[in-house]
Amino acid sequence: MPDLSVQIGRVRLKNPVMTASGTCGFGREYAPYLDMSMLGGFTTKSVTLRPRKGNPPQRIVETPGGMLNAIGLANVGIDEFMKSKLPDCQTLGPAVFVNVAGESIEDYVEVCRILDTADGLAGVELNVSCPNVKDGLTFGTDAVLLKELVAAVRPVVKRGVLLVKLSPNVTDICSTARAAIAGGADALSMINTFLGMKIDIRTQRPVLANMTGGVSGPAIKPMAVQMIHRVYRDVTRAAGVPIIGMGGVRCWQDAVEFMLAGATAVAVGTALFAHPDAPMGIVRGIEDYLIQRGLGSVNEIIGAVHEVRD
Ligand SMILES: Cc1cc2nc3c(=O)[nH]c(=O)nc-3n(C[C@H](O)[C@H](O)[C@H](O)COP(=O)(O)O)c2cc1C
């Protein structure tokens, strides 16, 4: 049998298949459909310093080839998360990563400091697609601010790995990738959702109460593959920093494609809404692919795309 295990910083995942933040709740909700213990990793929805109600409804709408969401980081806040959610997440089986969001650098640092007191956490993932209340800039779209944020969080994440989740809503994703690594990221997650909007032509109003939201699902897959490939080739391969790839992964073929582009692991998000058991088929499919090709380890396909050059 081929070796499916991959390394994300100090953490070894038993296979490269994870769930994406915000699409799998705190894990328990999917228990009837998905055997979490089969997966390499699980990422929680974003947790913030204080509880948040999120945006008013309507918060989700289907779009061609995916969906548009503006949940607005609804969550119980870090104190309640530590008490009632994290212990349960940690019984699920896979490596647990907690996704963290904030409105200021101080918010992120405080949440990460509290998380670092938890035993057995694989790491934290910074959701940097949030505006900084101080200057209105989105952390993940400004390389200077992003580096400052990651560097501030780095010293308090002592026990687990520090993942930084890149926003695709930038002109040059390599510059934010470099900023995250310069700040001290152990790995990059890419990508978060693309900004989008849908208008109801009958009412002539935006469908989402928040007006805009994030586009996810198969519609964004080619952009995700391109961004992962570019960041792998131009930034992370030389730096030795792994990428967790996401954005429209539905089946094992998609997962293999992401890994050939340069991802060390993949996370399944929107696909879970239609096929909650999809990640299990992806694990089996990757294994069969390796067997058919006579490969001994999944690591052999990471970044293995043949680049056609003139
Ligand atoms: C309903 C929904 C909620 C999400 N919530 C979060 C979140 O709380 N934090 C975060 O970093 N990303 C969040 N995401 C983004 C996903 O983790 C993922 O990066 C993105 O959807 C692309 O992957 P996909 O196309 O497989 O869904 C959310 C996505 C969806 C669809």
Image (tube, rainbow, N blue to C red):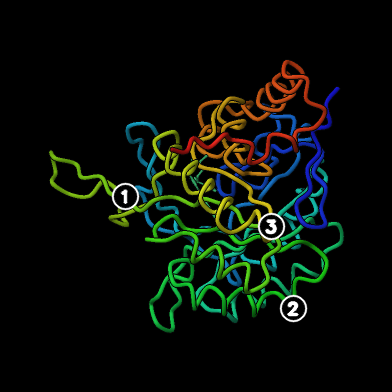
Residue 75 numbered tag: none
Q: Is residue 76 visible?
A: no
Disc 1 to disc 2, C-alpha distance: 35 Å
Residue type highlighted by circle 2: Pro
Q: Is residue 240 above or below residue 155?
A: above
For label 3, the crowd category at 10 Å Cα-Cα, with few meaning under 14, some 14 to 19 and many 20 or more, is some
User: Looking at the picture, how far across and down is residue 30, in whole percent?
Assistant: 65, 34
| Residue at image mark 3 | 241
SS at badge 1:
strand
Disc 3 to disc 1, C-alpha distance: 30 Å
User: Looking at the picture, how far across and down is residue 42, in whole percent?
Assistant: 70, 45
Residue type highlighted by circle 3: Val
Mark 2 vs mark 3: give the one in front. 3
Please indicate whether residue 36 sits to the left or right of residue 303 in the image.
Answer: right
Q: Is residue 174 above or below residue 134?
A: above
Q: Nearer the viewer, residue 115 or 188?
A: 188
User: Looking at the picture, how far across and down is residue 221, in whole percent?
Assistant: 46, 37
Residue type highlighted by circle 1: Gly
Whether disc 2's CB lies below 8 Å from ligand 1 is answered no
Disc 2 to disc 3, C-alpha distance: 18 Å
| Residue at image mark 2 | 155
